[in-house]
Image: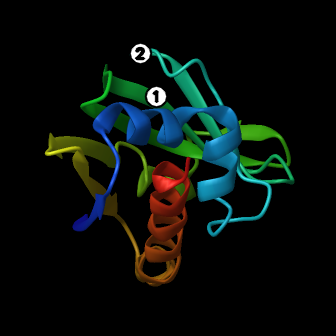
Amino acid sequence: MGKKQLKITINAPREKVWATLWNDATYRAWTAPFSEGSWADTDWKKGGKVLFLNGNNEGMVSTVAENIPNEFMSFKHLGYVKNGVEDIETAKTQGWHGAMENYTLKGQDGKTELVVDMDLNDEDYEKYFKDSWPKALEKLKALAESN
């Protein structure tokens, strides 16, 4: 499984960036470049379940591996949601099962460096990663720096 990393510096304190990442309204806004209507069904608590869904209620099923407020959030991906049904056992999901997605926030002088680390399992997703993630992070930056 390959690993990818993206970094962005945001002119806002860690607390503001954290809130922008995980607040429902702003989460929906910054994740729209992945799929219009993106949202997350979760309480963001460590050990809790996360359904990362699009407007058709399809997406990924994961768990919160770690949540250190304003510093670090980690997800362990388990499988997919298709037609409202979770799939964590078929051959298709086994290549994705256990992939990690980590968000690290480092604050300095009122700014925040956000580092996103992700395990990637196939070329199609790698292309998607290269196309969508920079757009999503620019949207996140704009949201966190506003107000």
Residue 76 appears in view:
no
Residue at the spot 35% in from the left edge and 42% down from the top edge: 98
Q: Residue at x 63, y 44 (%)?
A: 26
Question: Residue at the location (25% across, 49% down)?
Answer: 112
Where residue 101 sits: x, y (%)?
35, 48
Q: Amino acid at mark 1?
A: Thr
Going by the picture, which residue comes out furthest to the left? 108
Instruction: Looking at the picture, tell me which residue is in the foreground, 52 or 137.
Output: 137
In the picture provided, is 80 more to the left or to the right than 75? right
* 112 lies left or right of 125: left
**Position of residue 116 in the picture relative to residue 77 (left or right):** left
Q: Quadrant of residue 84?
A: top right
Foreground pick, 19 / 145: 145
Residue under label 2? 47
**Which mark, residue 63?**
1
Q: Secondary structure at mark 2?
A: loop
